[in-house]
C-alpha cells in the first residue's frame, strides 16, 4: 500500500478526461488495495473501472459466520485525497449503506490502523474443550476462594 498511498498524496492535473497520472494511480491503488484486502481474508472484491479521478467498490470482510459486505469510496483526487469512505452495505448495488466512516490515507500505518478498526476483521477461535482443562490449584491463603470451590463442585458432578 505504500506506493499507492504515496501516489494518492501527489497533486493531480485537472482535466476533463482521464489523465495518464490518474490511470497509473488507479492501476497501482487497485492492485495494492486488493492485495491488502486479500491479506485480511476479504473476498468478493469488486473495484470500479477507471472513472474520473475517483475510485469505489465493494468487498466482503470475514466478520463472524457469514461475513459483512462493505462499500468504499475515494473522492475526487484533485481536491479530496486525504480519506477513504467506508460503510457497510446490504448488496453490491448499495451505495448508501450504513454510517459513514473514514480511513486516513496519509500513511500506511494510519490507513491500516483506521481501516482495521472500522472493518474489524476477526478470525473465529476454535471451540474450547472444557473436559480436558486442568483443575485450578487450591488457594494459598487461608481465606475462602469461591472459584476454587465451585470448580471442585462442577468436576465432582460431571459424569
Image (cartoon, grey):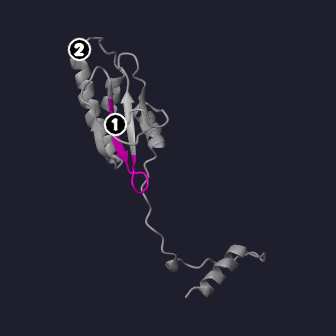
Find residue 132 and report its horizontal and vertical position in percent: 50, 79
Element at label 1: loop
User: Could you say which is closer to the camera, residue 2 or residue 158?
Assistant: 158
Task: Please identify the quadrant where the C terminus is shown.
Answer: bottom right
Image coords of residue 34 (percent x, y):
29, 39
SS at badge 2: loop
| Foreground disc of the pair 1, 2 | 1
Question: What label sits on residue 101 in the rendered view?
Answer: none
Whichever of labels 1 and 2 marks the residue nearer the N terminus, that label is: 2
Residue furthest left in the image: 20
Residue 17 has which mark?
2
Taking depth in this image into account, of 21 and 80 the one nearest to the observer is: 80
Q: Quadrant of the N terminus?
A: top left
Q: Which residue is drawn at 42% across and 56% down?
A: 123
Question: Residue 109's image quarter?
Answer: top left
Q: Residues within 10 Å of mark 2 (few under 14, many from 20)?
A: few
Above or below for 118 versus 24: below
In the image, 83 versus 95, the foreground residue is 95
Q: How far apart in space, not on screen, are marks 1 and 2 (Cα)?
A: 26 Å
Local packing at callout 1 (Cα closer than 10 Å; few below 14, some 14-19, many 20+) is few
Residue 116 pos. (x, y %): 44, 42
Residue located 48% across and 42% down the image: 117
Query: Is 140 positioned to the left or the right of 49 in the image?
Result: right
Q: Which residue is drawn at 48% across and 70% down?
A: 128
**Is residue 28 rendered to the left or right of residue 132?**
left
Q: Mark 1 points at which residue?
A: 93
As for residue 122 lying within the magenta part, the answer is no
Residue 25, given in percent of the width and then of the height, sits at 27, 25
Residue extent of the magenta highlight: 56-68
- Contact between marks 1 and 2 (CB within 8 A): the answer is no
Amino acid at each position: 500500500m505504500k506506493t499507492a498511498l504515496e501516489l494518492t498524496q501527489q497533486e493531480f492535473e485537472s482535466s476533463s478526461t482521464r489523465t495518464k497520472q490518474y490511470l497509473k494511480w488507479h492501476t497501482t491503488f487497485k492492485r495494492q488495495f486488493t492485495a491488502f484486502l486479500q491479506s485480511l481474508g476479504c473476498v468478493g472484491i469488486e473495484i470500479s473501472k477507471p472513472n474520473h479521478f475517483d475510485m469505489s467498490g465493494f468487498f466482503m470482510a470475514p466478520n463472524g459466520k457469514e461475513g459483512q459486505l462493505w462499500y468504499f469510496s475515494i473522492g475526487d483526487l484533485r481536491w479530496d485525497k486525504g480519506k477513504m469512505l467506508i460503510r457497510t452495505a446490504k448488496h453490491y448495488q448499495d451505495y448508501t449503506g450504513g454510517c459513514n466512516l473514514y480511513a486516513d490515507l496519509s500513511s500506511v500505518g494510519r490507513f491500516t490502523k483506521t481501516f482495521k478498526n472500522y472493518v474489524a476483521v476477526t478470525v473465529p477461535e476454535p471451540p474450547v474443550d472444557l473436559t480436558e482443562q486442568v483443575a485450578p490449584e487450591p488457594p494459598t491463603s487461608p481465606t475462602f476462594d469461591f472459584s476454587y470451590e465451585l470448580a471442585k463442585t462442577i468436576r465432582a458432578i460431571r459424569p
